[in-house]
């Protein structure tokens, strides 16, 4: 086995193959046990069709055993995904598009004599401005006598959270963190309102499905009862239902933040000008994270410079709006993500290594934290030292950060509903804490707002 070979900790469930890291790139190995299915997939024309439509990540076949394992049949080098995200960090429409993509893949596959053997959102990533399927080994030969083996998984991983958000009219992405393998049908059925039974498709795929599952834990039908037409009817029914689901637009505390900020004299325009000037002067920056991105107004300043930018915010409505607007404009450098910096996504799964934490994944050249410090320090009671360490972990080099003084009207509004225990919240203490890990390169007031913008560089280890 090669000394440079490292199997990805999340790639252990499928005997067909695995993902591994080798020489600064990720590869996928196809094992001998999957030889017939893989060759059929490659020769059927399905691969070319899916790649052409932008539904499947393209790959290069490398006839070399880079892993050195005896199970080796083929090595694939897929187009590299810049950032791995998880469904509990996605907005409603991101999950909805991933669900529809899964159904499109299943339908398309059936026409080539293949089928998806699993239907999990972990097989999909946001890539180059759209949701793309990344698991090439999910396609196997289709047996018309067998039901879709991934049906229940699809209903629990995709349909359950989407239906609950649709009926509850609330973003419930954190439920996917509580149920990383999918929300059980029985749980979904118990949480849905009675009126959901009036929807034929909801009744069929959740209420009836859950009842049948309780009686038959194997969830299998007699082989003679299923056909290709029944499969297509099933997929069409799921597609019809999901297309009808909506997350009602909700007004949140931060949904109109930039609309309000733009009304302040010389604030937002001046801030953008300062950031643009600083970015122009920086050495090569390829990746960035806008932490507290809101509607992405400042994230786009980076994306427009061809910088791949994670636009993260804890407000699901803001991120959903950002995702929808990015789809319309074809934005390829802006990755929307729901992240609460006070409670960033943890490491979960097998030995807490299967799904890595946001802090481990978000390693960028430049981090921006605009009008977010007071929400962490006063809204979440995070000490400046902890905030400084947070940004130290995320950025490899540069930090653009905004300090909002305690006299600011927004902070005064926050303090109107709680006891003021923040005597140490001041510019001097803020700078002192950040200087533990960063050197201040530039410091500039933002117009007459009283707010200050900093450009900092991380000390080299």
Image (tube, rainbow, N blue to C red):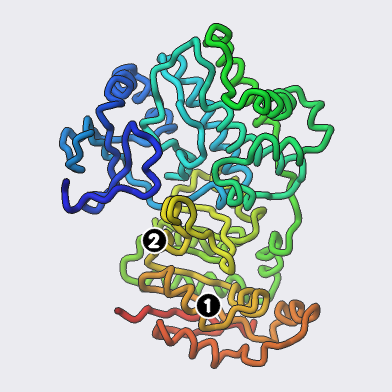
Q: Are marks 1 and 2 in contact (CB under 8 Å)?
A: no
Residue 372, position as x, y percentages in the image: 59, 72
Residue 214, position as x, y percentages in the image: 67, 28
Q: Nearer the viewer, residue 21 or 438?
A: 21
Q: Nearer the viewer, residue 230 or 321?
A: 230
Q: Quadrant of residue 254?
A: bottom right
Which residue corresponds to the image point at 39% horizontal and 73% vertical from the top-left?
398
Q: Is residue 41 left or right of residue 445?
A: left
Residue 223, position as x, y percentages in the image: 53, 10
Q: Residue furthest top?
A: 224
Q: Is residue 67 above or below residue 356?
A: above
Q: Is residue 58 above or below residue 337?
A: above
- Secondary element under disc 2, as helix, strand or loop, is strand
Between disc 1 and disc 2, the foreground one is: 1
Which residue corresponds to the image point at 41% horizontal and 56% vertical from the top-left?
308
Residue 188, position as x, y percentages in the image: 70, 38
Res. 387 mark:
1
Q: Quadrant of residue 227?
A: top right
Q: Residues within 10 Å of mark 2 (few under 14, many from 20)?
A: many
Q: Is residue 340 left or right of residue 47?
A: right
Mark 2, residue position: 287
Which residue corresponds to the image point at 54% horizontal and 37% vertical from the top-left?
98
Residue 321, can we see it? Answer: no
Q: Residue furthest right?
A: 195
Q: Nearer the viewer, residue 363 or 262?
A: 363
Mark 1 or mark 2: which comes first in sequence? 2
Q: Residues within 10 Å of mark 1 (few under 14, many from 20)?
A: some
Q: Is residue 283 above or below residue 154?
A: below
- Secondary element under disc 1, as helix, strand or loop, is helix
The number of discs equals: 2
Q: Is residue 305 left or right of residue 335?
A: left
């Amino acid at each position: 086995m090669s000394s440079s070979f490292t199997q990805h900790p999340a790639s252990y469930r499928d005997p067909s193959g695995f993902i591994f890291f080798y020489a600064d790139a990720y590869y996928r190995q196809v094992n001998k046990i999957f030889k017939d299915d893989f060759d059929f997939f490659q020769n059927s024309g399905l691969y070319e069709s899916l790649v052409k439509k932008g539904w499947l990540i393209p790959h290069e076949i490398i006839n070399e055993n880079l892993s050195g394992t005896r199970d080796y049949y083929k090595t694939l080098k897929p187009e590299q995904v810049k950032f791995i995200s998880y469904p509990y960090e996605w907005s409603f429409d991101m999950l909805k598009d991933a669900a529809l993509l899964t159904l499109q893949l299943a339908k398309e596959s059936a026409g080539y004599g293949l089928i998806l053997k699993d239907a999990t959102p972990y097989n999909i990533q946001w890539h180059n401005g759209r949701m793309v399927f990344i698991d090439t080994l999910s396609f196997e030969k289709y047996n018309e006598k067998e039901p879709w083996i991934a049906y229940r998984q699809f209903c629990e991983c995709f349909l359950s959270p989407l239906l609950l958000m649709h009926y509850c009219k609330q973003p419930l992405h954190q439920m996917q963190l509580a149920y990383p393998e999918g929300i059980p049908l029985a749980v979904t059925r118990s949480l849905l309102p009675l009126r959901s039974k009036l929807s034929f498709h909801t009744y069929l795929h959740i209420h009836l499905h859950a009842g049948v599952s309780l009686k038959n834990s194997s969830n299998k039908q007699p082989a003679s009862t299923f056909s290709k037409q029944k499969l297509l009817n099933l997929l069409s029914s799921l597609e019809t239902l999901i297309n009808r689901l909506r997350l009602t637009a909700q007004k949140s505390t931060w949904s109109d933040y930039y609309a309000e900020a733009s009304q302040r004299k010389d604030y937002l325009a001046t801030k953008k000008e300062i950031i643009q000037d600083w970015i122009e002067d920086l050495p090569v920056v390829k990746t960035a994270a806008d932490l507290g991105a809101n509607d992405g107004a400042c994230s786009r300043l980076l994306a427009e410079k061809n910088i791949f930018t994670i636009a993260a915010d804890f407000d699901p409505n803001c991120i959903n709006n950002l995702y929808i607007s990015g789809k319309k404009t074809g934005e390829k450098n802006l990755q929307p993500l729901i992240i609460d910096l006070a409670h960033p996504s943890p490491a979960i799964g097998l030995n807490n290594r299967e799904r890595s934490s946001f802090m481990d994944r978000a390693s960028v050249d430049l981090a921006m934290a605009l009008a977010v410090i007071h929400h962490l320090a006063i809204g979440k009671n995070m000490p400046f030292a902890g905030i400084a360490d947070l940004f130290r972990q995320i950025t490899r080099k540069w930090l653009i950060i905004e300090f909002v003084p305690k006299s600011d009207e927004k902070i005064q509004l926050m303090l109107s509903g709680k006891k003021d225990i923040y005597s140490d919240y001041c510019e001097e203490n803020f700078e002192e804490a950040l200087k533990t890990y960063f050197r201040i390169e530039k410091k500039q007031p933002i117009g007459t707002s009283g707010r200050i913008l900093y450009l900092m560089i991380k000390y080299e280890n």
